[in-house]
Image (cartoon, coloured by chain):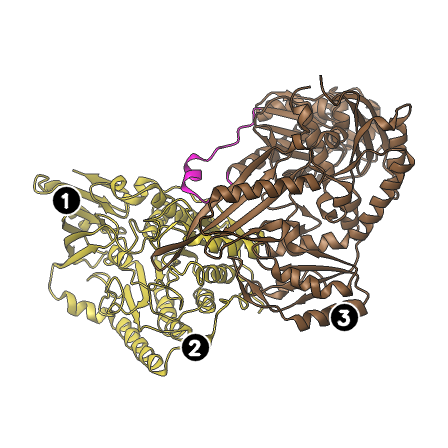
Chain colours: A brown, B yellow
């Protein structure tokens, strides 16, 4: 018997079209609910779906609420962002012209090198002047980013100390990610500040709503990597919540399927098809970070390839070629939409019996004429083309993953290749398309139960994820905890094992702060490298690089097969 | 600085699990900080910089270039096949038009590896540029190729391999051989009798700085290249001319390297030496990548860069100006010199002792090249090493005439294999390698 008996988890995904909620009790779906999303007022959608699903339920029985929302994504995509003053310690390398992310970028002198050694100090006077300028110009938000600040955050922290008095809130580059990539660190830090205000307001409203609905259980927010964090710490890192919707669906699929095999997960929607890949049952993450609206970021996110083709994609003929997507002009013609779509094709050839078949056929007349064939043949061809597009994207994705550059002889010779043995499909057209997709890819297909609310289930069952980067330099006698901005003195005898130990301790502290539970602290070491530091011809120290993470996965009790 | 962007392929293979020994300059972390700098600058996020995974060179690719004694597997490790494979991948991407140029940032290096390989010398086992070039010729047809070797050490291996090839121009710029390993690369080393002038050596005095290198580039290298008109230009991009390199004594900088690469505009650059792993390589490599991609490199400099303190003396400048004029005159007179050198000879022999410093092997070699007006000539090599191996090799160097080929086949057939441990036959045009 599980100790959580009788306790419930509420999972909500506020998506672009629908807002879905599931109530999970003893890891069984107790209830599901779906409402249309009110783009202008996400809170309204949240309120409706919560009321609907909690009707006749005792909110005191909720163990937690997990929310996935498009608030951050929308703010960025729609440009509803605040002005952010950026202070960049760029040092030698790329010219400022290639680093300037907005009009409020200020470059100051100073440099920390690749080993985290401070080579040139910062110019404190110019920082003060910039601070005064920010204040005078009404800039409330500030991002501070230094090159190699993940190796030594001291300059960022110093600048923060000077600028603090002049602005309302500051984001520091090294806190966002432990990965190297100055340009991405700049854009990520910028975005974090740019959406902070709108996100904080939303959080306040969510808290009020929970209060009104008598919910006292902790509230978690879903991140792009398919992990959760507590609503309060989430306020410092709103940028982590971008693109959590697709991650929610993938985590949902993960929760509904058995096995630890290499797999492909497809979420076929109206406009797009999301492709994710599981390696031995674990969803793959982006190597560096996700991209949103042209911004390449350092946000850890599930590796999801989004293809501009879905059930409602517009079909048109151009120069004798049929083009499917990437636009969606409305629902399928069979549901009163303006143009023929793959869904209509599937209705015509009898793969599904939804909608008005006559209207679908009517919409296909012109295409059939352009293709010089019957409506049925045209529908068959469109169906094949749609499946073909998805399959080639899937195969290309696997090819890309398998051709990822590696930097050791061992990996070149022994590198593991991904070989998916099962295909999971969710989304509207999952049923009519899945068997053909499986045939083309050459592996068995599985459509999980409750696929239509996979996103909300994914949110409900995701565990807290986190990552820590450790960089030790025994010649300098310092270990740096990247994301935490900590610098700790170490003895010359410090080893890789010590570094891993520190990494795990710090990861534990961080995850607990983010709301993780003890049983969910399943850690693994994702980077483990040690190099000599040589002066002349003798070794004078070690350069140790460790990354530990709690990888995306499901809350413990579920994994244990309750 | 507004330039035309180019699509640049990057083959980055730092071989983090390979070293000659833990404290040897050619060790695991040689490209570690370069990786850090490339990652931190976010160079791989540029749309016009594309990273490719290196391929693995085949044994046949090595045998097309080298006579490995006793065989390829005995003188290399997997790392060498990946390093050469990385260079081949760079070439493939350029030849197929996927990119405008490519940089094989790979290790271990190769430019000290000569035609015959008894072991490792100058940290090199096999010549990765030559393996790449012969791969290109084998897959894409005959090509006029120019190699500009900007490593601080004389590229004696590449020189040896292409000594008799009139279709491969080899120009080496390096620290004067009287002051640095391998002690060769003087201006009178000018190519074999059928290929005189397609080997050009430019020894520079210690402490030559940016202006000296760029002077040589503008006054010798670029003029010769414009006359040679190569189909393909390759830069052996050693980085040990840097002022902070621990093994050499030059004063070149990251800015200088980037400028040189920009003006030279090679189709393919291949990393060679360079052992200032913290202070030079990160900046030099970022500079070269930006220059190749047509991006602004003007802010790439070493944190401790102080151009005035490392600037070459006026004496050095004058020496270099004089040398440049002499070398260019020599090049202009190459055809005349050739006639004088050949006279009525039917073949020309050269004897050379070769020392494999990395493996501690000594070799005595006699190379015979037949005089030919139609091709690079038939080459035979008689070599004995103190490993006990004694070999004879017949080389048909490529783009060879039928007379030289027939003669070579006859010599191979008639050579008594009992006199040597091994007798080899290498025909680059037909891609034939035989051993008996």
Residue B244 or residue B103, whichever sits in front? B244
- The mark found on residue B389 in the picture is 1
Q: Which residues are magenta?
A: A403-421
In the picture, measured across the screen, residue B347 lies left or right of residue A397, that is: left
- Name the disc covering residue B309, or none: 2
Q: Nearer the viewer, residue B132 or A131?
A: A131
Residue found at the far top of this picture: A1
Expressed as whole percent of the image width and height from the top left, the position of residue B24 reads 33, 53
Q: CA distance from mark 3 to mark 1?
A: 78 Å
Image quadrant holding the N terminus of chain A, namely: top right
Q: How far apart are the alpha carbons under marks 3 and 2? A: 38 Å
Write the residue at 62% across / 23% down.
Answer: A438
Mark 3 or 2: in front is 3
In percent of width and height, residue A292 lies at 70, 47
Residue found at x 24% / y 66%: B190
Residue B54 visible from this viewpoint: yes
Q: Position of residue A87 (x, y in %)?
A: 68, 64
How far apart are the two marked residues, 2 and 1, measured between alpha carbons? 51 Å
**Which residue is at 59% across, 41% downward?**
A505
Pair 2/1: label in front: 2
Residue at the spot of label 3 = A132
Residue A30 lies in what quarter of the image? top right
Task: Name the chief secondary structure element in magenta.
Answer: loop
Q: Which chain hosts label 3? A: A
Mark 2 closeness class: few <14, some 14–19, many ≥20 residues within 10 Å: few
Decide: few, some or many residues near mark 3? Use Cα within 10 Å; few <14, some 14-19, many ≥20. some
Circle count: 3
Q: Mark 3 and mark 2 in contact? Answer it, CB < 8 Å.
A: no
- Which structural element holds mark 3? helix
């Amino acid at each position: 018997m599980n100790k959580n008996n009788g306790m419930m988890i509420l999972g909500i995904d506020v998506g672009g079209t629908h807002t879905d909620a599931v109530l999970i009790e003893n890891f069984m779906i107790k209830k599901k609910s779906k409402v249309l999303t009110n783009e202008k007022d996400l809170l309204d959608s949240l309120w409706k779906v919560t009321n609907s699903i909690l009707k006749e339920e005792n909110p005191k029985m909720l163990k937690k609420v997990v929310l996935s929302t498009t608030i951050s994504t929308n703010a960025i995509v729609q440009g509803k962002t605040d002005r952010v003053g950026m202070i960049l310690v760029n040092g030698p390398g790329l010219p400022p012209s290639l680093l300037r992310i907005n009009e409020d970028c200020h470059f100051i002198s100073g440099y920390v090198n690749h080993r985290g050694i401070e080579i040139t100090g910062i110019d404190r006077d110019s920082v003060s002047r910039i601070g005064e300028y920010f204040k005078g110009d009404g800039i409330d938000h500030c991002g501070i980013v230094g090159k190699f600040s993940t190796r030594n955050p001291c300059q960022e922290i110093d600048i923060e100390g000077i600028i603090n008095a002049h602005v309302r809130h500051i984001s520091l580059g090294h806190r966002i990610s432990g990965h190297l990539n100055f340009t991405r660190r700049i854009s990520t830090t910028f975005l974090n500040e740019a959406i902070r205000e709108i996100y904080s307001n939303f959080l306040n409203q969510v808290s009020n709503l929970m209060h009104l609905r008598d919910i006292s259980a902790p509230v978690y927010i879903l991140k792009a990597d398919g992990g959760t964090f507590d609503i309060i710490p989430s306020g410092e890192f709103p940028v982590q919540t971008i693109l959590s919707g697709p991650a929610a669906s993938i985590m949902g699929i993960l929760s509904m399927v058995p096995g630890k095999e290499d797999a492909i997960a497809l979420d076929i929607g109206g406009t797009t098809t999301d492709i994710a890949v599981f390696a031995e049952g674990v969803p793959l993450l982006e190597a560096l970070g996700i991209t949103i609206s042209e911004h390449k970021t350092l946000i850890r996110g599930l590796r999801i390839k989004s293809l501009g083709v879905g059930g409602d994609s517009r079909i048109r003929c151009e120069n004798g070629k049929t083009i499917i997507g990437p636009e969606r002009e409305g629902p399928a013609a069979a549901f009163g939409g303006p143009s023929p779509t793959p869904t209509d094709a599937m209705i015509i050839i009898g793969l599904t019996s939804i909608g008005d078949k006559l209207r679908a056929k009517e919409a296909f007349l012109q295409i059939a004429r352009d293709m010089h064939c019957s409506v049925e043949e045209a529908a068959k061809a469109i169906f094949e083309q749609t499946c073909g597009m998805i399959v080639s994207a899937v195969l290309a994705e696997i090819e890309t993953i398998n051709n990822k550059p590696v930097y050791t002889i061992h990996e070149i010779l022994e590198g593991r290749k991904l070989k998916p043995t099962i295909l999971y499909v969710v989304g509207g057209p999952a049923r009519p398309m899945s068997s053909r997709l499986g045939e083309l890819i050459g592996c068995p297909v599985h459509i999980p139960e409750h696929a239509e609310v996979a996103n909300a289930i994914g949110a409900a069952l995701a565990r807290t994820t986190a990552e820590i980067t450790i960089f030790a330099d025994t010649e300098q006698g310092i270990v740096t905890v990247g994301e935490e901005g900590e610098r700790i003195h170490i003895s010359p005898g410090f080893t890789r094992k010590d570094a891993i130990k520190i990494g795990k301790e710090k990861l534990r502290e961080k995850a607990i702060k983010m709301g993780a539970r003890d049983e969910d602290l399943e850690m693994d070491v994702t980077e483990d490298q040690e190099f000599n530091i040589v002066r002349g011809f003798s070794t004078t120290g070690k350069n140790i690089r460790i990354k530990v993470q709690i990888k995306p996965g499901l809350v413990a009790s579920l994994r244990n097969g309750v | 600085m507004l330039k035309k962007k180019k699509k640049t392929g990057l083959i980055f293979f730092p071989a983090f699990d390979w070293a000659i020994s833990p404290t040897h300059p050619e060790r695991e972390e040689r490209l570690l900080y370069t990786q850090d700098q490339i990652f931190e600058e976010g160079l791989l996020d540029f749309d016009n910089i594309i990273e490719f995974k290196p391929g693995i060179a085949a044994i046949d690719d090595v045998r097309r270039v080298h006579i490995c004694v006793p065989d390829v597997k005995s003188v290399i490790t997997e790392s060498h096949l990946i390093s050469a494979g990385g260079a081949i991948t760079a070439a493939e991407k350029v030849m197929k038009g996927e990119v405008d140029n490519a940089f094989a940032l790979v290790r271990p290096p190769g430019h000290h590896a000569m035609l015959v390989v008894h072991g490792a010398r100058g940290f090199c086992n096999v010549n990765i540029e030559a393996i790449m070039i012969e791969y290109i010729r084998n897959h894409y047809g005959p090509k006029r190729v120019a190699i500009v070797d900007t490593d601080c050490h004389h590229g004696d291996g590449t020189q040896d391999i292409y000594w008799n090839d009139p279709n491969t121009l080899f120009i080496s710029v390096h620290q004067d051989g009287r002051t640095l390993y391998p002690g060769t690369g003087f201006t009178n080393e000018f190519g074999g009798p059928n290929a005189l002038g397609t080997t050009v050596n430019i020894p520079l005095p210690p402490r030559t700085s940016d202006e000296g290198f760029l002077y040589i580039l503008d006054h010798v290298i670029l003029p010769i290249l414009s006359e040679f008109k190569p189909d393909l230009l390759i830069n052996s991009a050693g980085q040990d001319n840097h002022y902070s390199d621990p093994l050499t004594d030059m004063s070149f900088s990251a800015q200088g390297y980037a400028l040189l690469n920009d003006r030279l505009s090679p189709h393919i650059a291949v990393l060679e030496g360079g052992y200032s792993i913290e202070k030079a390589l990160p900046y030099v490599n970022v500079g070269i990548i930006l220059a190749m991609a047509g991006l602004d490199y003007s802010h790439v400099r070493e944190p401790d860069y102080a151009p005035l303190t490392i600037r070459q003396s006026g004496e050095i400048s004058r020496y270099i100006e004089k040398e440049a004029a002499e070398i260019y005159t020599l090049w202009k007179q190459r055809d005349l010199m050739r006639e004088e050198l050949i006279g009525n000879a039917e073949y020309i022999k050269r004897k050379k002792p070769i020392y494999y410093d990395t493996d501690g092997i000594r070799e005595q070699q006699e190379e015979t090249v037949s005089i030919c007006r139609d091709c690079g000539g038939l080459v035979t090599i008689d070599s004995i090493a103190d490993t006990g191996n004694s070999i004879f090799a017949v080389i048909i160097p490529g783009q060879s005439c039928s007379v030289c080929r027939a003669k070579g086949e006859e010599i191979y057939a008639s050579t008594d294999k009992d006199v040597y441990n091994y007798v080899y036959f290498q025909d680059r045009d037909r891609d034939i390698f035989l051993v008996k």
